[in-house]
């Protein structure tokens, strides 16, 4: 058994661990979507069946024209709960099916990153968004895909990179220094930077844990931003890919890793293309490869996801990168000890990595002065199209929600009644309008029964009823549960079958909360309870 391997693996797990193979998803995509024979993937048939059955991009019927329609919460509200049906009628095909002649197929997905201007679809890889998206698909309306409104382009850390010149300046200066790892870890530790993907784990501690393990080690940028309502990672990967890649390289230097990976969700084709181009340009400029700037070897591989919300959880993400089913793995061991291909791995969110070059350049103490200790720094919050001024804003942690909603976002759009806010995505939770004096802090929101998550904020108005919203959430949970543990798998199915009854079933919610394997199943009860608190008896 190769060094670092563990017993009890499947044949596919042994193959990818031995070969260090991240091309499995691509081979499966070619074998299933491209129409090639399963044998052409070079993988065991059983392994192909299990993985293909898990990922929606690989299992969804495909026609000559493949359309993906966003069924996420922001688009659900923007379309008054009707836009998926409107798209189905316009194309003459139901979601999850292909037309009899093979000309058109339709797949429902749960976010395309157009929450600021939805509803949205992907026609092939071409995004379309707006109130008459069905008309855009049929040619009755002009095709459009509005860019992300960046309301704070001169933000103090991450969004400043959108207007900056060429990147890699910090990397070029540090890559050849023998003391670079210690310097980076020290500055990031001083800054107090925590993961911006929702878990909030200190970045420096994660890198130290990985660096203490035997080589080879890996670093991974998690670009699987699946929370409906959030599009910060899409913004950064599309408009500032060098900043993300430089942050990944600096994380690799801190960990002593010679190889980095960027996992980009397939629902972000423009971000995927942007990152791939940036990697090629960085290689050509001498920032990636062997003995970079007279120092260590470091190169980056880009991996395309295949349609799974739970793949944003780090153990699921690492399995997905290997072409395995994206189900959650029991921990310990943690990825810092046993991650990609069985090797020590640091997984960081895209927004976290985008902050690293700025922090190292300006010094950790400067970043620590932002925010409200111990939750220091900034967060890119994303507002949906129900706001007067939707878009991405970089704000200091601790900023009152009222300032975000009214001062930055301009409050509700004209003619709409603000009934609640969803904060932190489908596993975050809902707040009533009288709770807007809460600060944008994980600790304060947790005490109020919601989670900060990735920073998406969705204004809920009277476009949909509370009962419709509750049913929508349970459908999402049932659809995206990875099925690895019984409490989550069966609990979400019961919720989808009878949303009102499941939401009032205290024993069911308690069981999911304490016995689910990962934060997905454990977060569902909190979100459901918060919706019922915010909207009361209207939930049914």
Image (cartoon, rainbow, N blue to C red):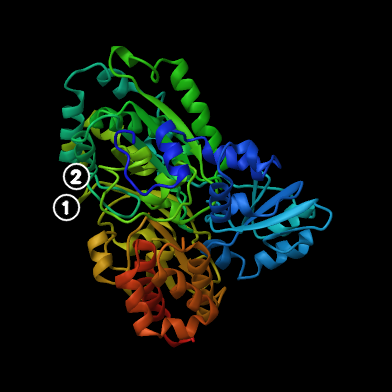
Q: Position of residue 513 (x, y in %)?
A: 32, 72
| Depth order, front residue of 411/330 | 330
Q: Which mark is residue 418?
A: none
Residue reaching furthest to the front: 1
Q: Would you say residue 99 is visible in this rendering?
A: yes
* Residue in the image at 73% along x and 54% along y: 105
Q: CA distance from mark 1 to mark 2?
A: 7 Å
Q: Secondary structure at mark 2?
A: loop
* Residue in the image at 53% along x and 70% along y: 475
Residue reaching furthest to the right: 101
| Depth order, front residue of 384/269 | 269
| Depth order, front residue of 516/72 | 516
Q: Position of residue 463 (x, y in %)?
A: 57, 73
The quadrant the N terminus occupies is top left
| Depth order, front residue of 294/70 | 294
Left or right of residue 471: residue 519: left
Neighbours of disc 1 within 10 Å: few (<14), some (14-19), many (20+): some
Q: Secondary structure at mark 1?
A: loop
Which residue is the site of mark 1? 374
Q: Would you say residue 372 is visible in this rendering?
A: no
* Residue in the image at 75% along x and 48% along y: 65
Q: Position of residue 462 (x, y in %)?
A: 54, 76
Does residue 214 sit above or below 477 in this rendering? above
Neighbours of disc 2 within 10 Å: few (<14), some (14-19), many (20+): many
Does residue 413 sit above or below 503 in this rendering? above
Q: Which mark is residue 192?
A: 2
Q: Position of residue 166 (x, y in %)?
A: 41, 23
Residues under numbered marks 1 and 2 in contact, where contact means CB atoms less than 8 Å apart: yes
């Amino acid at each position: 058994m190769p060094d670092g391997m563990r017993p009890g693996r499947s044949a596919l797990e042994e193959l990818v661990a031995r070969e260090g193979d991240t091309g499995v998803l691509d081979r499966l995509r070619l074998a299933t979507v491209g129409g090639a024979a399963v044998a052409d993937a070079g993988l065991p048939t059983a392994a192909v069946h299990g993985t293909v059955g898990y990922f929606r991009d690989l299992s969804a019927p495909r026609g000559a024209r493949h359309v993906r329609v966003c069924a996420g919460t922001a688009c659900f509200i923007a379309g008054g709960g009707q836009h998926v049906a409107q798209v189905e009628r316009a194309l003459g095909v139901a979601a999850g099916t292909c037309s009899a002649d093979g000309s058109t197929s339709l797949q429902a997905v749960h976010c395309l990153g157009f929450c600021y201007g939805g509803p949205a679809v992907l026609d092939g890889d071409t995004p379309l968004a707006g109130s008459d998206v069905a008309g855009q698909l049929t040619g009755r309306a002009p095709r459009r895909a509005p860019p992300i409104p960046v309301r704070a382009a001169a933000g103090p850390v991450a969004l400043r990179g959108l207007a900056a010149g060429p990147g890699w300046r910090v990397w070029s200066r540090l890559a050849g220094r023998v003391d670079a790892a210690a310097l980076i870890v020290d500055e990031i530790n001083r800054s107090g930077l925590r993961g911006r993907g929702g878990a909030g784990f200190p970045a420096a501690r994660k890198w130290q844990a990985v660096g203490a393990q035997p080589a080879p080690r890996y670093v991974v940028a998690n670009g699987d931003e699946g929370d409906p309502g959030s599009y910060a990672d899409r913004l950064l990967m599309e408009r500032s890919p060098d900043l993300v890649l430089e942050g990944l390289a600096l994380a690799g230097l801190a960990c002593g890793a010679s190889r980095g990976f960027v996992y980009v969700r397939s629902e972000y084709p423009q971000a995927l293309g942007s990152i791939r181009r940036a990697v090629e340009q960085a290689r050509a400029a001498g920032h990636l490869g062997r003995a970079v700037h007279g120092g260590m070897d470091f190169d980056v591989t880009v991996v395309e996801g295949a349609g799974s919300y739970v793949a944003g959880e780090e153990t699921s993400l690492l399995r997905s990168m290997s072409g395995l089913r994206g189900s959650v793995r029991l921990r310990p061991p943690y990825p810092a000890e046993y991650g990609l291909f069985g090797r020590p791995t640091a997984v960081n969110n895209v927004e976290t990595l985008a902050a690293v070059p700025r922090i190292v350049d300006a010094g950790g103490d400067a970043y620590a002065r932002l925010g409200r200790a111990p939750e220091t720094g900034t967060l890119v919050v994303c507002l949906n199209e129900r706001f007067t001024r939707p878009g991405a804003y970089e704000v200091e942690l601790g900023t009152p929600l009222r300032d975000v909603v009214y001062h930055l976002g301009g409050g509700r759009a004209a003619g709409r009644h603000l009934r609640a806010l969803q904060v932190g995505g489908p596993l975050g939770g809902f707040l009533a309008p009288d709770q807007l004096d809460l600060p944008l802090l994980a600790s304060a929101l947790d005490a109020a029964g919601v989670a900060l998550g990735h920073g998406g904020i969705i204004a809920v108005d009277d476009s949909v009823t509370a009962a419709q919203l509750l049913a929508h959430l349970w459908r999402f949970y049932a659809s995206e549960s990875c099925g690895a543990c019984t409490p989550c798998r069966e609990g979400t199915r019961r919720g989808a079958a009878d949303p009102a009854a499941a939401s009032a079933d205290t024993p069911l919610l308690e069981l999911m909360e304490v016995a689910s394997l990962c934060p997905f199943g454990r977060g569902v009860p909190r979100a459901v309870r918060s919706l019922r608190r915010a909207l009361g008896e209207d939930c049914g």
